[in-house]
Image (spheres, grey):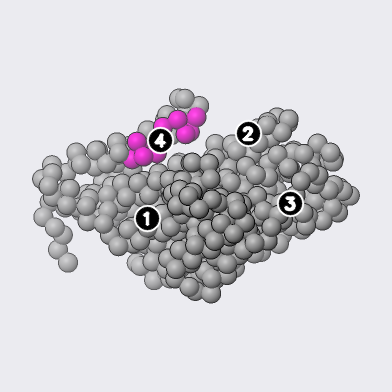
Amino acid sequence: MEKEAGVSEARLSGLLPVAVFLVLFIGSGVVLQNFYAMPAVVAFLCALAVAFAQNPRRTFDEKLDSVARSMGEPNVMIMCLVFVLAGAFTGAVSAAGGVDSTVNFALSVLPTGIVLPGLFLIACFISLSMGTSVGTIAALAPIAIGIALKTDLGGALCLGAIVGGAMFGDNLSMISDTTIAATRTQGCRMDDKFKENFKIALPAAIITFVVLLVIGLGSDYAVQGDLTYNLWQVLPYIAVLVAALAGVNVFVVLVAGTVLSAIVGLALGTISPENVFTVVGSGPDGSGGIMNMYDITVISIICAGIIGLVKDNGGIDWVLDLIRGRVHSPKGAQFGIAALTSAVDISTANNTVAIVIAGPIVKDISEEYDISPRRAASLIDTFASVWQGIIPYGAQLLYASAGAAAAGMAVSPFEIVPFLFYPFLLAASALAYIAIRQK
């Protein structure tokens, strides 16, 4: 097929907008010592401006048409709509009391004799239910520090356990923004990706549990305080998980989950009739719900436009040619996907943004080497989760450290890294899975 007039062949310069984004985002983080000082959407807008400035052989209108077509690509729009519906569900279920009840239920069944691996399991369950690693860590970090202060277990060790569990659920949850981004960019069903992903995550989780069990032998602690919960408030999370695994369309799952959450909240009096629509839009505290998904939705749309121009300017072809020169099999291509995803996540410190950036390139690689969409989605989500759970400047470890400080113990993100057994084991499991299975 002939290229459109004015569209470049494979060129390294086509990747300039991506480089500009990384320099701005990482540079501001280094200079200001805060990797979240510059909003990602601002850095992406600067990158989009650079992309427009490239390739003077094409008119501005031609470039704008490329951007609009790339932004309006069906998978991009579907992904954004799923983000919105996931935000609606989380807003409604949080207002219904689902978050507090889920956390309290998990803590109330924590066996006192296996407190350390118990923390890991609870974090797995909560993050799998809620679809957020940061939310899980924020909820459990003070509890983990409370346990550390009253046992012989170190604070960094306890935090490492909950961070690992949080990344397990974030990687697998049906309502996680990483799962949504991975499945939509690769064009596969959520339940197919879950089944593929579970084969990688389960061995890592089992080994992590055993390691934590051995380390925590002899530590005995029972969580104190009010652990009141209502299983009706946990029901929407369970219903969404079961329905998604059963293969029900994700739109139906999220809409039904939102309606069920609203019904539970109204029945229990946690949501008043006049606020039922408000909590869907902004959550119980005014900053959640659909509003909480605005950033990632806008970022996804802008990033799609940038990728459209990067592709037209030869950047994607340059990456593919680079990989073709070093990869000669589906197995090698999967290692390439792992390396590409890892590099982008380390650079952006945001696993969802990393998936959105790398997704179109991974899609082209997987089609070139006949790698199934569910395998590609599983790999891109897994390696983004691996590094997001390890980098000390990522939100996960920063929240863990902040939670520790609030609970009365100083623990730096770097101190937690040696105890992140699950992310390291997940990486090993994923690499072994690639080495053992062809495609």
Residue 37 part of the magenta-drawn span: yes
- The residue at 17%/67% (across/down) is 1
- Measured Cα–Cα span from mark 3 to mark 4: 38 Å
Asked whether the viewer can see residue 394, the reply is: yes
Pair 3/4: label in front? 3
Q: Tell me the number on the disc at residue 39.
A: 4
Residue 403 part of the magenta-drawn span: no
Instruction: Please tell me which of labels 1 and 4 falls first in the chain.
Output: 4
Q: Position of residue 268 (x, y in %)?
A: 62, 56
Instruction: Give the secondary structure at mark 2.
Output: helix
Pair 1/4: label in front? 1
- Read off the residue under disc 1: 80
- The residue at 11%/55% (across/down) is 5
- Read off the residue under disc 2: 402
Pair 2/3: label in front? 3
Q: Residues within 10 Å of mark 3 (few under 14, many from 20)?
A: few
